Image: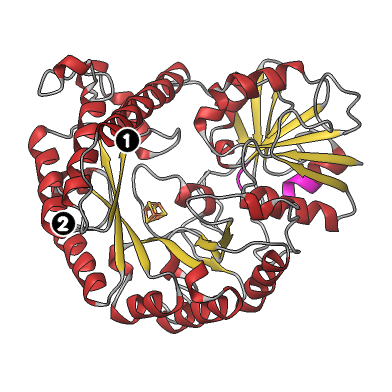
Amino acid sequence: MKITIVSPDLYTYGSMVIGGVLRDAGFDVTLTKSLESPEVNADTDADTDVILLSLYSTLHLLDSRIRDFTSQSDKTIYVGGPVSAYPEIVLGELNVDAVIIGEGEESTIELLENGVSEDISGIAFRSDGEIIMTEPKPANIERPMPLIPDDIRNQSIRGANVYVETHRGCIGACGFCQVPKFFGTKIRSRDIEDIVAEISEFKRRGVRRIAISGGTSSLYQYGNGKSVNVNAFIELLQAIAGVMGSRNVSVPDIRVDYVDEEVLRAIHDFTMGWVYYGIESGSDRILKEMRKGVNSEKNVYAIELAQQCGVKVGGSFIVGYPGEAIEDYQLTKDLIEDTFLDDIFVSIAEPIPGTHLSELVLKTDDSENPTFMEHGGEYRALKLTESEARCFDLALHAQMCKSVPSILTDQLYNACLDDAQAQGRDVRAVTRLLQKYRGRRTRTDQISSKNKDTGIVT
Ligand code: SF4
């Protein structure tokens, strides 16, 4: 059977993993990032039997290219990826045959071999006007070599050609994040030998820079005898640096409460020397609302510790969380002013369906949601929403408070404004989509409320 995996615009790691699993199961599998690819284009005589569409963003469901693609294709299409956490919305928005829920390694093979039915684990599909979901099976964390495309060397995701998974799951419970729901709250780590073999293969295929993904990086081997297994994390970084060279390895995301001096020294010695913290807010009240599990004091301590260890610190911040008052926002500005971060990313709170934030947004009237509230302050003339104004203002503020401040040029001003407006548009669109599906029910009688093996909450 000929299968084409379409991962629009970029090769996600998940699409490469599924590609490898299917290849080793005997399928003739191709991976493309183009919806125009001859294997799948409705205007060509495409010889694919089944298309697997890998979607990682809620915005994909509103993307006219993807909507047209699914409505014009006469092929069987199954959707997988992070959007599968809200299958009722996928099935409501796209003309596809089924959604592969959560980790798809097991379900995809079952589905391809048998077709859509209630006997297949971990799928959602329409039947007689209702949506049926079946219980997902946890995937085996050890799997075959990914299907690596020939042009992987040309891909850049925040500077890395590819993000490689070292473990699945996160013990955090951040209200805006879907990782714990998608991968579970129990950490499942891959063997170091498998990770190194995979990275060596990526390197052989032309990859020059890799990033480590998997919730928060220092949770690698968490729970195997110790809570945070510092030695395992150091061994992991050392081994990866041995293949790629330390300057070609980055550790993008890490929780401030799971770093110490040893972890930071290892990041300094075996990676490009940056750590990225999700600081999110300078207000303890909002951090609590976000369920971050840390307060400002811990955030500042982790920043300073990294700086003392010679590690550069990037911080990401979220503005426009429901209930964020102007005083909370001011505390975020103060924190940025006080900490001399090396780089700063600002996002408007995006209510990914199924997260605690999405529930909060659904309970918040538009008139009190910063995503829709008209900004009446300093940037009134720009006709921004309150979220956009804070995103714009914080980005400008950050440029001037970084360890090496940027000169505020017209170009920089316009780039910050464009970004804030684009984010505002996207978050409004996602919120409207969420509101459209408020209260819709699926038939889930075959799905348990919690899979006890993995901790995956369904
Ligand atoms: S620590 Fe990171 S991965 Fe874990 S729940 Fe929070 S944001 Fe998500």
Q: Is residue 43 left or right of residue 244?
A: right
Pick whichever, 10 or 87, lies toward us.
10
Label disc, if present, on residue 349 of the rendered structure = 1
For badge 1, the amino acid type reads Ala
Q: Which residue is mark 2?
A: 296
Q: Is residue 105 magenta?
A: yes
Residue 373 found in image quarter = top left
Pick whichever, 318 or 86, lies toward us.
318
Residue 277 percent across, percent down from the top left? 31, 58
Q: Quadrant of the N terminus?
A: top right
Q: Is residue 78 magenta?
A: no
Q: Secondary structure at mark 1?
A: loop
Q: CA distance from mark 2 to mark 1?
A: 19 Å
Q: Mark 2: give few (<14), some (14-19) or many (20+) Cα within 10 Å.
A: some
Residue at 21% across, 60% down: 299
Residue 295 found in image quarter = bottom left
Residue 259 percent across, percent down from the top left? 32, 72
- Magenta highlight range: 101-109
Q: Are marks 2 and 1 in contact (CB under 8 Å)?
A: no
Residue 293 percent across, percent down from the top left? 26, 56
Residue at 50% across, 65% down: 187
Q: Is residue 182 left or right of residue 206?
A: left
Going from N to C along the chain, the mark reached first, 2 or 1, is: 2
Pick whichever, 355 or 83, lies toward us.
83
Query: What is the total number of numbered labels drawn onto the structure image?
Result: 2
Residue at 84% across, 54% down: 23
